[in-house]
Each structure stands twice: as C-alpha cells, then as structure tokens.
C-alpha cells in the first residue's frame, strides 16, 4: 500500500495547463525523486500536496484516506511539510522563533516560553545532526545556505510523515549537501517519505530509490533509480535525446587582457584580490559559499563601494557603478544572482525587460522608437530561443529557464564583451543549462571574456578554462588544465593558507 | 488603442465606473447631463486632474508626494501678493512660480533619491515647512484678489469650451506622451516596479525620481494659480482637499499605489469619478459631516475596487460562489 497516491491530477491557470492527468505513487520508507524540466508541472504538483494550490481534477490518497488540503496549515496538520526554493523565514525573528513559528509553547500569560523553545530546538538539531547554527541568532544575519538549513528545520519541526525538498540543495555548500542527503535517507528510514526535487542527477542517484519523471504536466515514467541511466532520464525529461550537457572545450583565449584586477577590496568580505581575465576566456570562480564571490562580482559591476584597480581592455575604470559599467562594447555586464529581485521586472513584458539596459539604442532625443525596439527584441528572442507567446508576455509567467534567458538577453543587448555570470544556471532546467553553456563557449569564441561563478562544482570543472578559488575574500588558488577537478577546487577552498 | 485598453484593464474599469456614476447622477438629479453642467464638471475635474498629473508620475515611480497642498497654496498666495490684482506682472510671475514649484519638487526628489529620506517623511516635512513659511510671510493677513487674466484662464471659455479644459487637454497629451513614448517614461515604470532591478540594469534612478517630483511641484503650482482664478482669490488651506483627491484619482485610475503601473489616461477618469461623486452626494440631502463620511467611504471602496488585491479577493469569492470544489468540473478556457 502506497503512502501517497495521486491519480489524474490536473490544474489549469487560465488557458495554460500546468498539470494534465499527472500520476504519482510513493511508498513509506523511500526517498522518491521527482524530476522534470522547468514548466513540467513539478512545482504545481508539490504546491498541491503542500496545500498552497487546489487541483481542478484528480484524486489524491494519503495514508489510506482522501487528501484535500485547503491551505498549507491543513497540509502540515495532515503530515505533509514542504521546503520550497523561496524561503519563508521572517528575517527579524531568531532561528528558533522561526522554526517554531505559530507553534510556540506559551505560558498562561501568552508569553513564549524561551526555555522550552530552546530545548526543543536543540533536541531537533541533535536528532538530525544539524550543522552548527546558534538558535538565538536573528535570521537576517545568516547566510543564504544557513537560512536554507533553518527552513529545513522548520519543516521537520512539524514532525511530518512526508517531507518535500524542492531544490533544497541549490544554495547549499558541498558539506551541507552531504548532510541533507544523509538526513533524507535517515528520515525515510524511519518509515516516512521524502519527495526530492533537484536538477542535479548526481544527488538524485545518491539518495533516491525511486524516480518519477514529469513532462508537460504529465507523468512520463517511474522507475527504480538503479535501473535507468542518466541519459535515459534526461531523454525522458526532454522528450528527445540531448547530445551532451557540457559543450566541447575549445581554447579560444588570446593573449589580450580583457580585465585586469589588482588589489580589489570591498568591506571585510573581499580582500586584496588580483586576477587577469583574457579575451576569449571563461574564468570560473569557485570556493565555498560566502567567501567573497558575491562581493567580487558586485564590486566589478560597481554595486557598493570598493577600492583597488580595475582595468577594462587596458583602460582604468575610474567611476564605478552599473551605469559606468554598462557602456557598450567596452563595458562590463552582470547576470546577477537573484533573478527575481535583481534581474527581472516580473510584472513587465519580455520586451521591456530585454531592452531596459539599452534604451538609448532605440531612442533619439529621449523619444522611443517602437520599430527599432521591436527589431532588437526580435533579434535577441531568436538568438536565445526565448520561448514566449509574444514579446509582450509578462516575464514573471515564463519558466525559470526562459526568465534567465531574458536576463542574459538584456545583458547581451548592451554588447558589453566582459560578462560576469553569477550562478547563471541556478533553478534552470537541464535543457536550458546546456544551452547556456554552449552560449558561453560561443561567446568566448567571438572574443567575449567571461567570469563565471557556480554553486554547482561540476559546472566549473566542465565549462571553465581556469578556475579561481576564493577563500575568506581572497584568491586562494587559480587552477589550470589538469589541475581543475572537484577535488582540487574543494582542497583549495578548505585548506588554510599561511 | 484597443491593445492599450486590453493591457490596462484597470483603466477601462475606471472609465466604466465613470459612465455608471454619470448615469446614476442623472437619474437622481435630472438635468445633470445638460451642457452647462457637464462644463462645470469638466472644470472641477480639471483642477483635480492637473494636481494629480504630477502625483501620477511620482506614484508610478514608486513614491508619493504629500507636499502638494502647500506647494499649490504657496503658488496661489504668492501670485496674488506679487501681482496685486494686476495682469501685467503675471507675464513673469506665472513662469517664476512654476519654476519655483518645480524647484520645490526637485528638492523633494533629491532628498528622497540622493539622501534616502523616505518619500512620506520628506514630502510631509516640505509641506509643513511651506505652510509655516507662508504663514510667517503673510502674517495671516488675507491676500489680495486674483488678477483678471487668471480668472479668464480658470473660468473663461473659447466658444463652448472652458479654457482650463484646453489647458488640461494639452497637459494630458504631454503626460501620456512622456509616459508611453519617452525613455524617461520607460525608466520611471522600471524604477517604480523594482529599484534594484533598475539599478542592476543601469537605469539612472536619481535623475528619473527627481524628474518625477519636479513635475509634481510644477503641476501643483500651476493648479494653485488656476484655482485662485476660479475662486477669484487665494486663501490659506485651499490646497488641503487636493492631497487626498490627487492620490485617490491616481488609484481609481488603476495605478498600483506601490508603483510601477498605471497611466495618466486612467487618472483622468479618476478625476472625473471624484468630481461626479461630489456632485452626486449632495442629492442625498445629508449634513456636511455625514457627507464627508460618505465621501471618504465611497473613495475607499472605489480605490479598493480598482486595486489588484481586490481582484484577487473577487476571484476567490467567485470561486466560492461557484461551489468552490476543486472537482466542480472543467472550466471553459
């Protein structure tokens, strides 16, 4: 008897079917991976399970009874807790207050019982061997990775029968990822169910016994993980064979310096960084999360204050700021970390987003030319194969991969030949990931110079020509050629230099 | 135009509301739709519409301008004091005060965009400072009457058409052009939608915000002088009613009060809706106090109707009324 059975589940948003007759069966005691491209319906399905969305049709049986959660609280009460990609923590509350939010033990005077709160938190942390996080720390002071860990604790605090992990490792460092995979295995071992969603097949293989694949809102396959190859899974997800994820590495780097950075410092997070980036090169930036990579990218793009020298194509950058950076062919463009908060105007059209950074390119005397704008948009939508019904479709309604393509397109339209890509494949489906890597190599071959950070180590290993590893805001090592490996990156990131 | 309206459902709703209100009013007070009545209506709406023009830009850019009442009031009083009822000096007084209003707006914008003062605090403080300044300057003595020329601008006619309506039409065309067809307009929507995204895209945030507030100061000063012409005199407190109405007109016109959306074409409908309401309510024979209460409630409801939060709520209500069951059957799509 399966713990969770969903049959013929459908959900439509306006004219768009997010799910059309999806099936999902999972037994207690297993980690069950749910795979699919962005837009395949995974998110809608787990939102239904988590009580955030109600299905139009279909039957869900949970623990032997029909399941219909009117809201997330009801789903949690029934025993289903979800950890979503978007965090739900309240920054001004402490770790423990967040974990037990609205479940605090209260004394008769309705005061939160601090002692009980602390004890319960430590108990929970000990039970699942949580990474060290102070329970009384305010969430606003935590790194993104630690917030994700707290989010997981919050889900576990409800003592659920089903734990849903939606891309929970995308912001975790390798060590915490290992921990979470162990936690999933252990949780399932207690006779409960983990539904595991990830774009990283390596992890899926490591942790999941069963895998269900969604495509276009339908279930296309369900297997024992051990009985299928990665290629087969990817083919099922895409509905076609994908030649390979990583494009062939070509040595397109020339001797010409695109970017020369000396003594770059910003606050206490970025200290005295030196490196060169050559024309035609893809330089990876690695290291554990929060070791100054974000500050490096922002300082180069001119966000916040920084000291030190930045030379672009042989010319010193004096004034700093995005407006000074985005100055056409000799400029520098950034695909930022936070697609929704920094990259896209979600409520505006694809067209307005694509051309936001290049308004002077289609206006004269401050007056816009709709014709010239249309031409720029059409050209970029074709070039990047952006899947939108019309250029006027609202950007927020695109799939994650297509949203990221719009952010890329906006930066490519500036014609800047130094590109800073901060985790450009995060939350992007595998098909689009392959397209992004190919695009990077093609641009490098055209003489672009690319600085590329990724939280996914294999991407650095397979895509970058060299990898600069950061540690405590400094460049700990620059790996080249055969020296580039996951092991090498980790080693350089962890070993203290004296 | 049809495409424009399809994209701006809220604006279409504002015009629908305006027509419904007109129909209601003519039912309660027959003769309301007579030419002379409509003319008065348009003149009164024009004052709201002109003050709300700058407010529209500021709100689209993600801010709010609470300094309008006393920018308006200062322009009105200074004009009467300086011109002393003579038409001659107006040739330089009117341009000077328009520039002064724009300058006050620019100060608002610089405080907000450069020094990071929250818009509510900055503009409220400027409002109070102007109020204090004008009290000190006039010493509370009643200012002189309005010169003939501004009275003509406010109540005069060209054929059957009020002069102020012509001024409003010209401003409306200019505002719509600025919003839809210029780099400034495009950047204003971007800043109002997300200042962070705008910054990461190299949009000149400071320049854009300061321009919006500058425009707001300009239109407030203009409205102040026209209003003086309409009342034949300037008086202390004449700008106060325009704070609420300018914001309400923008909101009824379909703009999000959080910025990034809306259009002046909607604000025009908002100005008419508010004017018709003030005309409709006296027909209910209420006391002045009760009238204000009803007015406030009606505006609250109207603005909520126009807001997105309400359309979400309405969608939820519709779902409940339909039976609400997820399995209730296929929706036509």
Image (cartoon, coloured by chain):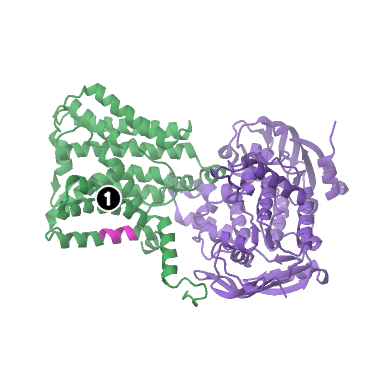
- Relative vertical location of residue A467 with respect to residue B214 in this rendering, above or below: below
Q: Quadrant of residue A211?
A: bottom right
Please give the name of the residue rendered at 54% of the width and 67% of the height, measured from the top-left corner.
A54
Q: How many marks?
A: 1
Query: Which SS class for mark 1?
Result: helix
Residue A330 in view here = no
Q: Quadrant of the C terminus of chain A?
A: top right
Q: Position of residue A117 (x, y in %)?
A: 65, 44
- Taking the image as shown, residue B185 lies to the left or right of residue A115, namely left
> Which chain did the renderer colour purple?
A
> Which chain did the renderer colour green?
B
Task: Answer few, some or many: residues within 10 Å of disc 1's Cα (few below 14, many 20 plus, some between 14 and 19).
Answer: many
- Taking the image as shown, residue A63 lies to the left or right of residue A498, namely left
Residue A225 in view here = yes
**Is B214 in front, or is A40?**
A40
Residue holding disc 1: B271
User: Is residue A263 shown in magenta?
Assistant: no
Please give the name of the residue rendered at 72% of the width and 53% of the height, measured from the top-left corner.
A169
- Taking the image as shown, residue A329 lies to the left or right of residue A240, namely left
Q: Position of residue B19 (x, y in %)?
A: 25, 61
Point out the residue furthest to the right here.
Answer: A482
Q: What stretch of residues is rendered in magenta? A: B13-19
Q: Quadrant of residue A40?
A: bottom right
**Is A312 in front, or is A184?**
A184
User: Is residue B14 shown in magenta?
Assistant: yes
**Is A258 in front, or is B246?**
B246
Q: Position of residue A295 (x, y in %)?
A: 67, 38
- Taking the image as shown, residue A267 lies to the left or right of residue A227, namely left
**Is B262 in front, or is B177?**
B262
Q: Position of residue B47 (x, y in %)?
A: 24, 44
Question: Mostly what secondary structure, the magenta segment?
Answer: helix
Q: Quadrant of residue B63?
A: top left
């Amino acid at each position: 008897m399966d713990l969770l059975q969903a049959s013929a589940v459908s959900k439509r948003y306006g004219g768009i079917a997010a799910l059309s007759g999806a099936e999902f069966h999972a037994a207690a005691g297993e980690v069950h991976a749910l795979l699919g491209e962005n837009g395949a319906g995974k998110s809608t399905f787990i939102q239904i399970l988590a009580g955030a969305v109600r299905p139009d049709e279909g039957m869900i049986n949970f623990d032997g009874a029909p399941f219909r959660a009117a809201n997330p609280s009801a789903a949690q009460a029934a025993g289903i807790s979800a950890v979503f990609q978007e965090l739900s923590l309240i920054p001004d509350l402490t770790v423990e207050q967040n974990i037990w939010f609205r479940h605090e033990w209260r004394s008769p005077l309705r005061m939160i019982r601090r002692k009980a709160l602390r004890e319960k938190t430590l108990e929970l942390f000990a039970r699942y061997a949580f990474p060290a996080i102070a329970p009384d720390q305010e969430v606003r002071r935590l790194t993104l990775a630690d917030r994700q860990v707290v989010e997981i604790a919050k889900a576990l605090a409800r003592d659920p029968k089903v734990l849903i992990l939606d891309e929970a490792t995308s912001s975790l460092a390798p060590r915490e990822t290992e921990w979470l995979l162990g936690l999933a295995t252990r949780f399932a071992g207690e006779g409960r169910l983990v539904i595991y969603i990830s774009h990283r097949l390596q992890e899926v293989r490591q942790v999941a016994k069963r895998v269900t694949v969604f495509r276009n809102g339908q279930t296309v396959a369900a297997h024992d993980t051990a009985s299928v190859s990665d290629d087969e899974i990817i083919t099922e997800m895409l509905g076609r064979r994908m030649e390979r994820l990583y494009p062939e590495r070509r040595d397109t780097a020339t001797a010409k310096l695109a970017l020369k950075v000396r003594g770059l410092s910003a606050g206490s997070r970025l200290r005295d960084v030196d490196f060169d980036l050559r024309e035609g090169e893809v330089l990876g930036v690695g290291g554990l999360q929060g070791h100054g990579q974000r500050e490096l990218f922002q300082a180069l793009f001119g966000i916040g204050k920084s000291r030190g020298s930045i030379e672009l194509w042989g010319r010193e950058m004096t004034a700093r700021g995005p407006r000074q950076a985005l100055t056409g062919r000799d400029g520098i463009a950034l695909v930022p970390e936070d697609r929704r908060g920094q990259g896209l105007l979600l409520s505006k059209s694809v067209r307005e987003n694509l051309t936001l950074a290049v308004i002077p390119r289609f206006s004269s005397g401050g007056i816009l030319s709709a014709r010239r704008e249309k031409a720029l948009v059409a050209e970029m939508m074709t070039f990047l194969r952006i899947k939108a019904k019309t250029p006027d479709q609202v950007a927020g309604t695109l799939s994650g991969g297509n949203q990221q393509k719009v952010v890329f397109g906006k930066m490519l339209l500036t014609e800047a030949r130094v590109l800073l890509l901060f985790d450009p494949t995060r939350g992007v489906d595998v098909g689009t990931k392959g397209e992004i890597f190919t695009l990077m190599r093609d641009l490098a071959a055209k003489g672009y110079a690319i600085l590329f950070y990724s939280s996914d180590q294999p991407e650095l290993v397979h895509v970058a020509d060299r990898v600069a590893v950061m540690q405590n805001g400094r460049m700990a090592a620059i790996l080249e050629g055969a020296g580039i490996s996951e092991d090498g990156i980790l080693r350089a990131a962890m070993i203290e230099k004296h | 135009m049809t495409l424009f309206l399809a994209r701006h459902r809220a604006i279409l709703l504002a015009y629908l509301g305006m027509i419904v209100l007109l129909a209601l009013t003519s039912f309660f007070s027959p003769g309301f739709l007579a030419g002379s009545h409509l003319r008065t209506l348009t003149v009164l709406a024009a004052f709201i519409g002109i003050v709300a023009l700058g407010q529209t830009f500021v709100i689209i850019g993600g801010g709010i301008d609470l300094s309008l009442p006393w920018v308006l009031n200062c322009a009105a009083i200074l004009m009467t004091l300086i011109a002393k009822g003579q038409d001659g000096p107006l040739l330089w007084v009117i341009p000077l005060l328009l520039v002064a209003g724009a300058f006050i707006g620019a100060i608002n914008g610089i405080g907000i965009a450069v020094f990071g003062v929250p818009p509510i605090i900055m503009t409220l403080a400027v409002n109070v400072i102007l109020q204090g300044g004008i009290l000190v300057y006039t010493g509370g003595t009643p200012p002189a009457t309005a010169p003939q020329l501004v009275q003509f601008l406010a109540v005069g006619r060209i054929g059957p058409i009020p002069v102020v309506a012509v001024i409003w039409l010209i401003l409306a065309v200019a505002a719509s052009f600025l919003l839809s067809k210029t780099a400034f307009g495009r950047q204003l929507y971007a800043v109002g939608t997300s200042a962070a995204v705008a910054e990461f895209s190299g949009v000149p945030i400071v320049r854009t915000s300061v321009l919006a507030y500058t425009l707001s100061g300009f239109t407030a000063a203009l409205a102040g002088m026209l209003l003086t012409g309409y009342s034949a005199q300037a008086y202390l407190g004449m700008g106060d009613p325009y704070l609420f109405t300018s914001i309400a007109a923008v909101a009824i016109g379909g703009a999000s009060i959080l910025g990034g959306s809306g259009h002046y074409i909607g604000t025009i409908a908002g100005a008419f809706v508010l004017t018709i309401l003030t005309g409709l309510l006296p027909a209910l024979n209420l006391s002045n106090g009760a009238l204000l209460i009803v007015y406030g409630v009606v505006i609250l409801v109207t603005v909520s109707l126009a807001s997105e939060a309400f359309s979400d709520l309405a969608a939820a209500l519709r779902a409940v009324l339909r039976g609400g069951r997820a399995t209730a059957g296929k929706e036509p799509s």
